Amino acid sequence: MPSVCLYFQVHQPLRVKKYRVFDVGRDADYFNDNSETNLNNARILRKVAEKSYLPASLTFLELLKKHPEFKISFSFSGVLLEQLEQYAPEVIEVFKKLVATGRVSVLGETYYHSLAFFYSPQEFERQVKLHEAKIKKLFGLKPKVFRNTELSYRNDVGVWAEKMGYRGVVTEGWDHYLGWRSPNFLYRPKGAKKIKLLLKNYRLSDDMAFRFGEKSWKEYPLNAPKFAQWVNAINGNGHLVNLFMDYETFGEHQWADTGIFEFLRHLPGEILKHPNNNFVTVDEAVKKFPVSGDLDVPHILTWADTERDLSAWTGNEMQRSALERIYALEPKITKIKKKNLTESWRRLQTSDHFYYMCTKWFADGDVHAYFNPYASPYDAYIAYMNACHDLELRATMV
């Protein structure tokens, strides 16, 4: 009897505008490009809200009303919630209605969608607490399951989450670490005692998130009955099917004309036709199912690219230089304690900035193109480093 756990990452960064060397010392706003360009964060956010967030959320609201057994989970970055409050408050209201059904869980994460766990544990904890406060304010609840940025995980993430009182952590169910074992069970992080790992079933998740509209795919076209059959096939060989993906899957990565919304409307009903199937939230999953042994993940694991590591963010010298530059500012920024400086510094930690500097191509190229407003990784690097230089000057002048 596999329970289905649908989880969605909802995040959009504040992209650094075309910040030139001539702007250093003159312009302290690194993110707001008021022209109608690809670097206009407000325009991007409204576009994504119209094409994806609103239609997907309204569809899920309909499905929750139609199917009392249906349940879903969300992970919202704080920087995304801020933008929705400013540019698309109607989306926030629909998310509140979803959570108010009592059948939607919200996960914990870093407020600024950063990689701080691997660069500054102190800053990481500060951002997690900021995120908890934001979720409490908007939705009236405290997350029980943790998700690090881009599902980035290592054994010490699980140990830390247990120490902080979380009951579960979600990450990628990658074959390299699982070996012969299945992602359709729960595991215990090595070094932890009680906390549980929920592992993404990447094959089924990616069928929906990436392959759905691919006409060259041998399973095209994918419909809800066919997908439900794949879920049913796990009966007797797993407790849980974790379908984790970006929320932009619906309407943006897979446009409406691919049939993705029609697929979504029929999916719960098709899965529930099997008497042994049901849906759970991430909170319910960690409470309901036992662990099936320890899982040792000694090196950083993510859900990105073919390598499933941090190389999409740290794979070249530009990225490593930019990361080193921003985190080197921590002692000065935290000592000054100026709200505007701290906020700029944290916004510059968002992982997307380094993702846009990625020079990996081939199989990973299309993934890196999503919402990337820069002509090249080098343009992203130049704008980012100019902004860092200005932030350093501002911090020095205080």
Image (cartoon, helix red, strand yellow):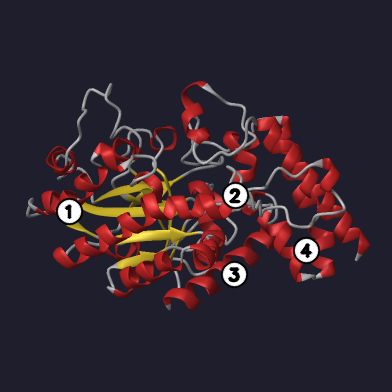
Task: Residue 24: tell me if it is visible.
Answer: yes
Upstream in the sequence, badge 2 or badge 4?
A: 2
Amino acid type indicated by mark 3: Leu
Q: Residues within 10 Å of mark 1 (few under 14, many from 20)?
A: many
In what quadrant of the picture does the C terminus appear?
bottom right
Q: CA distance from mark 3 to mark 2?
A: 26 Å
In the image, taking residue 394 as reference, residue 311 lies left or right, namely left
Task: Residue 67: tell me if it is visible.
Answer: no
**SS assignment at label 2:** loop
Amino acid type indicated by mark 4: Leu
- Identify the disc placed on residue 40: 2
Q: Residue at x 62, y 53 (%)?
A: 117
Q: Looking at the picture, does residue 30 appear above or below residue 316?
A: below
Q: CA distance from mark 2 to mark 4?
A: 22 Å
Q: Nearer the viewer, mark 4 or mark 3?
A: 4
Q: Residue at x 58, y 35 (%)?
A: 312
**SS assignment at label 3:** helix
Q: Residue at x 64, y 41 (%)?
A: 354
* Residue holding disc 4: 341
The picture places residue 226, in percent across and down from the top left corner, at 14, 37
**SS assignment at label 4:** helix
* Residue holding disc 1: 268
Upstream in the sequence, badge 1 or badge 2?
A: 2
* Residue holding disc 3: 130
The picture places residue 20, in percent across and down from the top left corner, at 79, 42
Q: Residues within 10 Å of mark 3 (few under 14, many from 20)?
A: some
Quarter of the rendering containing residue 314: top right
Q: Nearer the viewer, mark 1 or mark 4?
A: 4
Q: Residue at x 51, y 27 (%)?
A: 365
